[in-house]
Amino acid sequence: MPNNYQPDQISLSRDPNLDNFIFDPGSHTNAHNTPIGRGIYELLTSRLGVAVLMGAVIAAPSRPPVIATEPFVLRHVGTSGFTDEMKKYAGRLVRYIIEHLGGRWVRRGVKVTVASAYGSGSIYTFR
């Protein structure tokens, strides 16, 4: 993340496009109910999080968008946001957000080809 970028209260506020957003953490309920999980949820459902996810899907539809959130998650919750449990939780949350915004899931298991805490992820489209 650029050193000079500091998310403010407006960018970290809940995105208005998620007013009626309902998230079911399913088997990730334990992760969702931790302080780290709540921090990831807060970030990804914020104006900043939604903008990052939408931008990633639109700009690079053949790459998992969860990768674009990494620097923001790191700054928001620290390295604890990248345990296997939290990465799976974040992946489920990303899918719910993108589908709520009108996107659709394309496939899973797409290899990440840049330096990342993630080895693979799902890709989505807005078409």
Image (cartoon, rainbow, N blue to C red):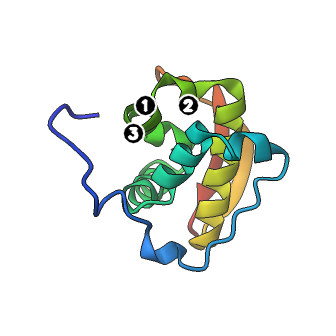
The alpha-carbon separation of the residues under discs 3 and 1 comes to: 5 Å
Task: Give the image location of residue 103, x and y in percent.
Answer: 61, 67
Q: Which residue is mark 3?
A: 72
Q: Residue most toward the top?
A: 115
Q: Are marks 1 and 2 in contact (CB under 8 Å)?
A: yes
Q: Helix, strand or loop at disc 3?
A: helix
Q: Is residue 126 left or right of residue 89?
A: left
Q: Is residue 98 visible?
A: yes
Task: Give the image location of residue 22, x and y in percent.
Answer: 68, 70
Three-letter amino acid code of the residue under disc 2? Gly
Three-letter amino acid code of the residue under disc 3? Phe
Mark 2 / mark 3, whichever is N-terminal: 3
Along the line of sight, the residue nearer the viewer: 91 or 103: 91
Q: Are marks 3 and 1 in contact (CB under 8 Å)?
A: yes
Q: Residue at 83% across / 52% down in the picture? A: 26
Figure check: 17 above or below 107:
below
Three-letter amino acid code of the residue under disc 1? Leu
The alpha-carbon separation of the residues under discs 1 and 2 comes to: 7 Å
Q: Residue most toward the bottom?
A: 20
Q: Which mark is residue 81?
A: 2
Q: Residue at 41% across / 52% down in the picture? A: 52
Category of crowding for the residue at label 2, using alpha-carbon neighbours closer than 10 angstroms: few (below 14), some (14–19), many (at least 20): many
Q: Which residue is mark 1?
A: 74
Task: Give the image location of residue 9, x and y in percent.
Answer: 28, 58
